[in-house]
Image: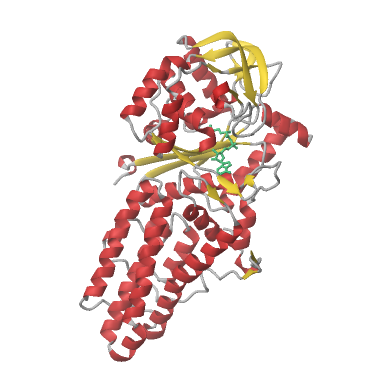
Amino acid sequence: MNQNSMDSFYITTPIYYVNAEPHIGHAYTTIVADVIARFYRLSGFDSFFLTGTDEHGNKVVEAAEKSGETVKAYVDRISKTFKETWPKLNIKNDYFVRTTDKNHQDTVSEILSEVYAKGDIYFSEYEGKYCIGCERFYTDTELLQGNCPIHKSEPRLIKEENYFFRMSNYQDWLIDHIDKHPDFIRPERYRNEVIAFLKDPLEDLCISRPKKRLSWGIPLHFDENYVTYVWFDALINYISANGYPEGEQFKKFWPVAQHIIAKDILKPHGIYWPCMLKAAGIEPYQHLNVHGYWNMRTGKMSKSLGNIVQPLDLAAKYGLDAFRYFLLRDMVFGLDSDFSEESLVRRLNADLANDLGNLVSRSMAMTVKYLDGSLFAPGKLEEADIGLREAALKVVEDYKGMMKAFAFNKALIVIWELIGRANKYIDIMKPWVLAKSDRERLGTVLHTITEVIKMVSVLLWPFMPQTAEKIQHQLGLDRSGLELTLDSLKEWGKTKQVRPISKGPALFPRVKVEEGRPAVLSDNVELP
Ligand code: MSP
């Protein structure tokens, strides 16, 4: 297949505000994007993965003032922290966009001009309740006892003249679009939330801020006294970053664009953004994938509550892959989850050290001990071997469907069922007995087990790339990582072994839990 005829896949994360450093919430969304991008690459797709930082607006200016730096120095510093954190979590984004990039600012101006020229932007006076945390106005019905439902603080009453986008013009179109494309916004609970919003008439969107109140923004070319409202600016990153309107990347990837966000920013993505795109004559994105919130026992994670979890600390403490695994296994995509280090450790010990770790270590050890690490062609397959092979092949198919539907926990559950089945197969086949009585049968059993382990390693690669590659290395395969595609798994038993199978150190050393609290593991630090 040549490069141009490859199927394409495009995934984005929100661009994060630079008013705080990356925490576990940002890490979760970005790791999910990495997992799904790796899955599509492994499926043979040409994949583009975008993340970045959102650097304009009031709250960024406030944070810069607090830190005593110039706004420019401040945004450069925090944006760099985000950019440098992702590779340390083995996240391989293809591009990192900043809303202060010249190219992005030019695209925002261009789109604003088009929408203005079309007559969809007008000037008017507005009075409303504005939450700085969300950088948006709230209607009374959206507030909870007068407070912002996310930040729990009272919004400011602001009255000023501004430019407005005729979002109301696109309400009927959007209702119809969601109706015709049931998985435009998923999971369903968030689609329903957007439909509920759309039951009331949509208010036009205020898309400017007077320079006298906020100068840190992209100037409106049709009125120099104003800058662009931060959401109108930020959402455009998804197309400015790949060369809208004429860039090859834009033409190739925009038709298959999928966004990942958490529920906090559903309205801008589920309503403002499709209407903006429609007004600018651009096709809407394909899917908006919405996940829930990680909560701490003390409630929502926030700087003021002092319960921020630093992703790099956890990865350093427990190992990067254990951290990635935990996030994807414990959260049901779409629902909220409680975060605790104790549950991370429980998963690490039970799923990783016991189930997966034991399967790999005892299988490798037996192959080395009984066959000097060299497998030979299997003999006639018996019912138990065929049963395991068929179960494994079915898992590959189920996994593909679950991954495409963002059901990561389910995909991991079916992989772990296979791991459990393989461990049981070993217990029943007793290779240690066969080693004394039936060498040919021993060879067939170990061959079947290593095939299953190879499959497991491929399916795990998007989640735990380092671990998957370590296993593939121990298996002595001629290929590893991205070279071992999902398609290659259809050919049971065809992967070449180019080196003898070898034993490695334990993939996941167990973490001791002392008095209910996990102890620090100093020998488990493994950042790429
Ligand atoms: N800058 C806007 C987004 C503009 S996109 C065009 C913004 N930034 S943010 O820094 O506040 O990031 C919000 C996103 O961070 C959430 O949608 C989610 O992806 C992630 N998370 C932040 N806290 C989170 C949790 N506690 N749990 C899960 N994810 C959360 O909004």
Image quadrant, ligand 1 = top right
- Name the residue at 59% across, 61% down: 342
- Side (left or right) of 460 relative to 6: right
Query: In terms of depth relative to the viewer, which is nearer, 49 or 234?
Result: 234
Counting from the top left corner in percent of width and height, residue 317 is at 63, 61
Q: Name the residue at the left extreme.
A: 380
**Towards the viewer: 468 or 153:** 153
Question: Is any atom of residue 339 visible in this view?
Answer: yes
The quadrant in which residue 527 appears is bottom right
Q: Position of residue 314 (x, y in %)?
A: 62, 57
Please state which of residues 331 and 112 is positioned toward the viewer in this rendering.
331
What is the basis of the colouring in this image? secondary structure
Answer left or right for 240 relative to 340: left
Locate the C terminus by quadrant. Answer: bottom right
Query: How many labels, in total?
Result: 0
Residue 451 percent location from the top left of the image: 33, 69
Q: Nearer the viewer, residue 219 or 426?
A: 426
Tell which residue pokes out farthest to the front in this image: 145
| Residue 69 appears in the picture as rendered | no
Q: In screen coordinates, is 428 left or right of 237? A: left
Q: Quadrant of residue 419?
A: bottom left
What residue occupies the far right of the structure in this picture?
A: 68
Q: Measured from the top left, where is residue 510 in percent x and y?
A: 56, 70
Is the residue 445 above or below the residue 251 in the image? below
Please give the name of the residue rendered at 48% of the width and 63% of the height, measured from the top-left corner.
467
Above or below: residue 146 compared with residue 325: above
Extreme residue toward the bottom, this view: 436
At horizontal 70% and vertical 18% (from top left) the residue drawn is 213
